[in-house]
Image (cartoon, rainbow, N blue to C red):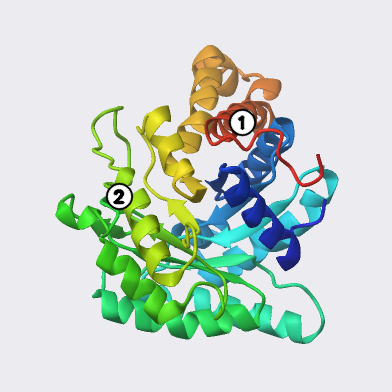
Amino acid sequence: MPIATPEVYAQMLDKAKQNRFAYPAINVSSSQTLNAAIRGFAEAGSDGIIQVSTGGAEYLSGPTVKNMVTGAVALAAYAHEVAKNYPVNIALHTDHCPKDKLEGFVRPLLEISAERVARGENPLFQSHMWDGSAVPLTENLEIAKELLAKTAAAKIVLEIEVGVVGGEEDGVANEINEKLYTTVEDGLATVEALGTGENGRYLTALTFGNVHGVYKPGAVKLRPEILAEIQEQVGAKVGKERPFDLVFHGGSGSTLEEIRAAVDHGVIKMNVDTDTQYAFTRPVAAHMFKNYDGVLKVDGEVGNKKAYDPRAWGKTGEEGMANRVGEACESLRSTGTSLNG
């Protein structure tokens, strides 16, 4: 299928919320990881979201070029072409963008999409994230309000973060403390500033103890009941059941029970990065160890071209990552829910 249109993306999000499942949002940084992600969604019979961070976009532009916009545009162009060969819908998203990178990442990409829409085309990306977790909530929401007007005009969904995700990802680092828990007051301030959809659709990452990075199960203290409390109290105030379309960040090490509780409370998108990075690299490492004297020209020998051909070990990495994407679909209940199913 072609990359999801704004209308199809809206249908995807609506279906997830109505049927209480969530889409894995898979971070990619190369054509190989992009292919692996789409394959994983297709094999699971799930539509899905593929996203690129500022660091991933820099890398995609060429490690010596480091141009975030170039990398993001290149990824989108590639994705628009290869996604046509798969039977599921794929939406493209840009991940965490802090204040100091807005001018060099999200704003230029928004301009590109606005120009495309003005020509009667679809936007390049279906959603963009503004990460205002490092600034005061008032400033966070002021910037979000300004961006929401622009994303709505370009037929794009905005993602915001209200609260703080601990740990570090692509240079955005936060301490692990009480700020990891969003309050009802934060939720009320959000709908007061942005509305509940009438000013443009947005996704909200409310935090309930989330931490980026690698952690063993039980190390991160999640409290998904916070999501239920905010949805209930804000919903009562605005007269709308589960008013927020929620995003789950920093889920590595979370238990299946915690994940599904969050989904029950309105999470429709869960970011997956650390786990799929490892799922790609682990089979590649196994290939290298198993074929040590083939991938290297040891003691003056010639090695084995079939072993060191990047396609040989690349395929193992893609398969491993695709399998992990399928596991994420199963955990989030999106398996077999494609709009095309």
Residue sticking out furthest to the left: 177
Horizontal arrangement in the rendering, residue 215 relative to residue 122 (left or right): left
Q: Callout 1: few (<14), some (14-19), or many (20+) C-alpha neighbours within 10 Å?
A: many
In the image, what residue occupies the spot 29% across and 28% down?
216
Please indicate, yes or no, whether residue 78 appears anywhere in the rendered image: no
Element on which disc 1 rests: helix
Q: Quadrant of residue 38?
A: top right
Please indicate, yes or no, whether residue 2 appears anywhere in the rendered image: yes
In the image, what residue occupies the spot 74% across and 65% down?
7
Q: Nearer the viewer, residue 214 or 4?
A: 4
Give coordinates of residue 204: x percent, y percent: 44, 62
Circle 2 sits on which residue? Answer: 226
Indicate the quadrant containing the C terminus: top left, top right, bottom left or bottom right: top right
In the image, what residue occupies the spot 62% across and 27% down?
313
Q: Nearer the viewer, residue 80 or 185?
A: 185
Circle 1 sits on which residue? Answer: 326
Vertical position of residue 176 compared to residue 141: above or below: above
Q: Nearer the viewer, residue 230 or 66?
A: 230
Q: Identify residue type, mark 2.
A: Ile
Q: Identify residue type, mark 1.
A: Gly
What separation in Å lies between label 1 and label 2 (alpha carbons)?
28 Å
Vertical position of residue 133 compared to residue 280: above or below: below
- The circle drawn on residue 290 is none
Report the number of discs.
Answer: 2
Element on which disc 2 rests: helix
Give coordinates of residue 8: x percent, y percent: 74, 59
Q: Quadrant of residue 109?
A: bottom right
Give coordinates of residue 114: x percent, y percent: 67, 83
In the image, what residue occupies the spot 62% across and 72% down?
156
Horizontal arrangement in the rendering, residue 77 relative to residue 197 (left or right): right
Horizontal arrangement in the rendering, residue 85 relative to residue 326 (left or right): right
